[in-house]
C-alpha cells in the first residue's frame, strides 16, 4: 500500500478530495486570500457524509498547525479509504487544512505568524500574560543572524536563562505556553481572530447546526512526545463535563494537560476548547488533540526558531531556505514506514473509541 501521507499541500489536498468524492461526500471549499509558495491556491475544505439533520457527528480536523497537516491529512485520507462504517444518525465532517497557508509554506503558524491553537481567545478581554516570555527571550529565540556568531550567543543566553530557572525544562514550560506580544517569535497567539479561526468556526457552526446529541471531535497534531507514540490531549479543564465525557469515551488514552506524565502543556486559546461554543444548544461534545511524537523537544524548537528567523530576517531565494523548510517537515513528520504504520494504528484505535461513544450516545 502506498503511503497516505504527502508532504506537499496541493498533492495532499488532491488526494483528500479524490477520496472524499469517491465516498460521495458533499465538499465545501473555502478559499484563503493568499497563495502558497508555488503560487498555488489555498483552501480549507470541508467534506461531509451523512444526513444534515443527524443527531450525532464525528469531526476530524487537520493542519491547525499548518505543517502538521502532512500527518493529519494522511489520516483523513486513510479514514476515507478505509470506508469506516458510522452508526446511524451520525454525520461525518472532515475539515482538511484548517491552516492551509501554514501547510503549504511548511510553517506551524498562519499567514500572520499566529499559533492558531493560541488564537481562540476572547480578544475583547485582557490578553493572557506570560511574563517569562519577554522581549529578551523572543530576541534570543529569533536572533538577527541564524548562521553566524549571533546564533551562538543567543543559544548561550537561552541556556543560561534556563539554568537560572532550574534547568532546560524552564524554557519548555515558558515558551510553548504562548504569548501575545512578539509577532515574530514562536507561539504568538495573535491580536485578533484570523482567517483560519473565523472560517473553521463558521464551518463547524453551519455543518453541525442540526446536531442535538453527541459531537466527537479529533484535531490531529504532531511534534510532541516520543517518536511514533500518540497521546490524545483532551479538551476541557479537569472536572468539566467536557473532560469527564472524554474520559468515559477514551478511558486512559484521554489525558488532560494538567495530568502528570502528559506531553502537553497548559495554555490558552485552543481550537477545541472554542469548538464547544460553536455547537448548537443541547449538543454535547467530546474531543481532543491527537498528538504524535516525531523528534525531541529541543529539535522541534530549533526547527521552529529557524523557520521564524527565515520569515523575519531571512531571504527565501537563498540556498538555506529550502534546508530550513526541510528541517520543519522533518520536525513534524517522520517518513519511515514504522512511524507511519504506528500512527495509523493509533489514529484508528482512537477513532474506533469515538465511534463506539457515538453508537452508545
Ligand atoms: Zn500542533
Image: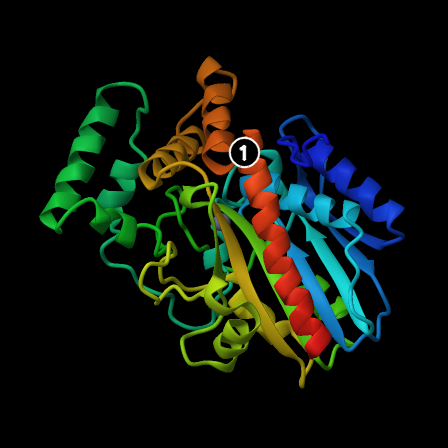
If the image is split into quadrants, where does the C terminus sit? bottom right
Using the image, determine if residue 299 lies above or below residue 109: above
Measured as percent of width and height from the top left, residue 273 is found at 52, 69
Measured as percent of width and height from the top left, residue 44 is found at 70, 49
Q: Residue at x 25, y 26 (%)?
A: 151
**Camera-side residue of 321 and 86:** 86
Q: How many discs appear?
A: 1
Q: Residue at x 79, y 60 (%)?
A: 85
Give the residue furthest to the bottom.
282
The crowd level at tag 1 (other Cα within 10 Å; few <14, some 14-19, many 20+) is: few
Q: Along the horizontal axis of the image, is 154 left or right of 21?
A: left
Measured as percent of width and height from the top left, residue 330 is found at 48, 30
**Camera-side residue of 3 and 57:** 3
Q: Along the horizontal axis of the image, is 358 left or right of 321?
A: right
Give the residue furthest to the top.
319
Using the image, determine if residue 62 lies above or below residue 13: below
Residue bearing the label numbered 1: 338
Q: Residue at x 52, y 77 (%)?
A: 242
Element at label 1? helix
Q: Residue at x 67, y 84 (%)?
A: 281
If the image is split into quadrants, where does the N terminus sit? top right
Amino acid at each position: 500500500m502506498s503511503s497516505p501521507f504527502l508532504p506537499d499541500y496541493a498533492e495532499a489536498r488532491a488526494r483528500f478530495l479524490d477520496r472524499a468524492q469517491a465516498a460521495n461526500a458533499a465538499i465545501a471549499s473555502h478559499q484563503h486570500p493568499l497563495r502558497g509558495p508555488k503560487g498555488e491556491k489555498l483552501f480549507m475544505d470541508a467534506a461531509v457524509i451523512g444526513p444534515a439533520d443527524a443527531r450525532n457527528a464525528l469531526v476530524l480536523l487537520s493542519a491547525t498547525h499548518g505543517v502538521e497537516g502532512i500527518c493529519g491529512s494522511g489520516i483523513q485520507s486513510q479514514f476515507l479509504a478505509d470506508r469506516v462504517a458510522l452508526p446511524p444518525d451520525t454525520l461525518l465532517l472532515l475539515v482538511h487544512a484548517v491552516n492551509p497557508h501554514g501547510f503549504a509554506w511548511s510553517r506551524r503558524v498562519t499567514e500572520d505568524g499566529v499559533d492558531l491553537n493560541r488564537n481562540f481567545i476572547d480578544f475583547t478581554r485582557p490578553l493572557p500574560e506570560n511574563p517569562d516570555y519577554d522581549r529578551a527571550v523572543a530576541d534570543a529565540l529569533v536572533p538577527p543572524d541564524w548562521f553566524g556568531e549571533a546564533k551562538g550567543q543567543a543559544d548561550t543566553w537561552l541556556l543560561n536563562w534556563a539554568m537560572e530557572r532550574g534547568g532546560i525544562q524552564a524554557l519548555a514550560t515558558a515558551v510553548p505556553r504562548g504569548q501575545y506580544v512578539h509577532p515574530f517569535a514562536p507561539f504568538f497567539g495573535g491580536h485578533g481572530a484570523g482567517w483560519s479561526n473565523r472560517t473553521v468556526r463558521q464551518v463547524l457552526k453551519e455543518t453541525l447546526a442540526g446536531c442535538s446529541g453527541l459531537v466527537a471531535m479529533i484535531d490531529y497534531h504532531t511534534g510532541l512526545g516520543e517518536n511514533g507514540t500518540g497521546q490524545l490531549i483532551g479538551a476541557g479543564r479537569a472536572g468539566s463535563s467536557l473532560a469527564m465525557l472524554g474520559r468515559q469515551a477514551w478511558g486512559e488514552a484521554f489525558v488532560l494537560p494538567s495530568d502528570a506524565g502528559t506531553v502537553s502543556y497548559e495554555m490558552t486559546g485552543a481550537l477545541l476548547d472554542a469548538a464547544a461554543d460553536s455547537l448548537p444548544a443541547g449538543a454535547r461534545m467530546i474531543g481532543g488533540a491527537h498528538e504524535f511524537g516525531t523528534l525531541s523537544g529541543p529539535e522541534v524548537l530549533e526547527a521552529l526558531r529557524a523557520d521564524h528567523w527565515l520569515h523575519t530576517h531571512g531571504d527565501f531565494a537563498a540556498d538555506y531556505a529550502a534546508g530550513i523548510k526541510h528541517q520543519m517537515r522533518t520536525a513534524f513528520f517522520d517518513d519511515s514506514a514504522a512511524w507511519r504504520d504506528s500512527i495509523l494504528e493509533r489514529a484508528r484505535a482512537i477513532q474506533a473509541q469515538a465511534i463506539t461513544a457515538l453508537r452508545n450516545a
